[in-house]
């Protein structure tokens, strides 16, 4: 009865009056001891206000409901896709938005929308993975800067593969303690390519010479990286280098001279297909049998 009267009143009320009423309605829904039918009617009334032409009215709803665990989910999803000043408070704060909701909103949204999702106090593994697949560098910078984001090694690799050309992305990735050697090696390649493609460097040194210098610098960086890689991770990195065509005789000799014997052994296994124990025996004794 009261809600029905409210809807009739809304049709003629001024914008500021409707905004104050929306605020009061949302507070009543959250705080008062409404009967179930009245609560349902209040939710219907708030749903009606989603179509109000004045953003102040919808913002009044968002301000009250954004941080509440009992806020109607469907209402919050709609507000999360409203204009930026309204959507921002909901996307950043609402606890009722599920991972599926956030992924859908990210897929339909703008760069700003995805940046807001990336800045939430907690970002799940699944949401972070979705952002890594569709996000531009700007929102992924926000994600990497967020200590509340749970980002797997696979997602970090996808970010590197898609945006390793970005200097800021490379810096944020390399600053992480959980970055695998394979991703670090991938970033070395991006740095090498950036160096080789620099107009300033090409103008000063020449294109042919810079290609050689960049390649040698990349090799040196990779060999330095190998010092801290062991076990299964070394095997994976070796395979990554093999697939990329990096296991050249010159590179392997450089690695061996630098004392990276475990890597050299792993590389020979990857290239030859021989058993690891046999390769190590050959390297130790110099004999093939």
Image (spheres, grey):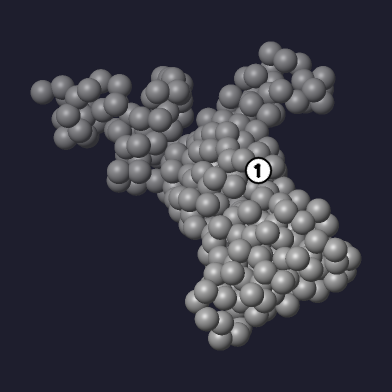
Q: Nearer the viewer, residue 260 or 31?
A: 31
Q: Compared with residue 9, is residue 235 higher up or lower down, i.e. above or below? A: above
Q: Is residue 223 above or below residue 105?
A: above
In the picture, the quarter occupied by the C terminus is: top left
Image quadrant in which the N terminus is located:
bottom right
Could you tell me residue 173's position as x and y percent? 58, 48
- Whether residue 175 is visible, yes or no, is no
Label 1: which secondary element: loop
Q: Position of residue 234 (x, y in %)?
A: 35, 40
Q: Residue at the far bottom: name it.
A: 33
Q: Position of residue 265 (x, y in %)?
A: 29, 33
The reply, left or right, for residue 246 in relation to residue 90 is left
Is 274 placed left or right of 22 in the picture? left
Residue 238 seen from this side: yes
Most distant residue in the top direction: 208
Give the image location of residue 159, x and y in percent.
Answer: 55, 40
Label 1, residues with CA under 10 Å away: few <14, some 14-19, many ≥20:
some
**Between 140 and 85, which is closer to the camera in this rendering?**
85
Q: Is residue 106 left or right of residue 88?
A: left
Residue drawn at x 67%, y 50% as measured from the top left? 81
Q: Which residue is mark 1?
A: 109
Among the 4 quarters of the image, the one containing residue 15? bottom right
Q: Residue at x 80, y 61 (%)?
A: 11
Q: Nearer the viewer, residue 122 or 146?
A: 122
| Residue found at the far left of this picture | 289
Residue drawn at (69%, 13%) of the image? 208
Viewer-proximal residue among 131 and 145:
131
Q: Which quadrant of the structure image shows residue 196?
A: top right
Image quadrant assignment for residue 249 = top left
Residue in the image at 50% along x and 76% along y: 36
Instruction: Please give left or right for residue 261 compared with residue 100 in the image.
Output: left
């Amino acid at each position: 009865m009261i809600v029905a009267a409210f809807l009739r009143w809304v049709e003629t009320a001024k914008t500021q009056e409707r905004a104050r009423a929306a605020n009061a309605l949302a507070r009543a829904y959250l705080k008062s001891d409404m009967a179930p039918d009245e609560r349902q009617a209040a939710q219907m009334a708030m749903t009606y206000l989603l179509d109000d032409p004045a953003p102040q009215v919808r913002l009044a709803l968002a301000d009250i409901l954004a941080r509440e665990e009992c806020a109607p989910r469907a209402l919050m999803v709609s507000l999360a896709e409203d204009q930026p000043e309204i959507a921002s408070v909901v996307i950043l704060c609402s606890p009722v938005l599920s991972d599926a909701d956030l992924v859908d909103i990210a897929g339909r949204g703008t760069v700003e929308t995805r940046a807001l999702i990336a800045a939430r106090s907690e970002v799940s593994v699944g949401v972070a993975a979705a952002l890594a697949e569709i996000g531009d560098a700007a929102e992924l910078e926000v994600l990497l800067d967020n200590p509340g984001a749970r980002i797997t090694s696979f997602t970090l690799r996808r970010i590197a593969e898609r945006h390793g050309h970005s200097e800021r992305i490379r810096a944020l990735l390399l600053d992480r303690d959980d970055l695998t050697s394979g991703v670090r090696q991938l970033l070395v390649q991006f740095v090498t390519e950036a160096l080789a493609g620099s107009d300033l460097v090409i103008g000063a040194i020449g294109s042919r010479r810079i290609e050689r210098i960049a390649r040698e610098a990349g090799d040196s960086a990779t060999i330095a990286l190998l010092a801290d890689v062991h076990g299964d991770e070394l095997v994976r990195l070796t395979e990554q280098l093999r697939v990329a065509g990096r296991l050249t005789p010159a590179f392997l000799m450089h690695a061996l001279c630098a004392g990276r014997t475990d890597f050299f052994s792993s590389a020979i296994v990857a290239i030859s297909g021989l058993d690891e124990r046999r390769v190590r025996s050959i390297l130790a004794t110099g004999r093939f049998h």
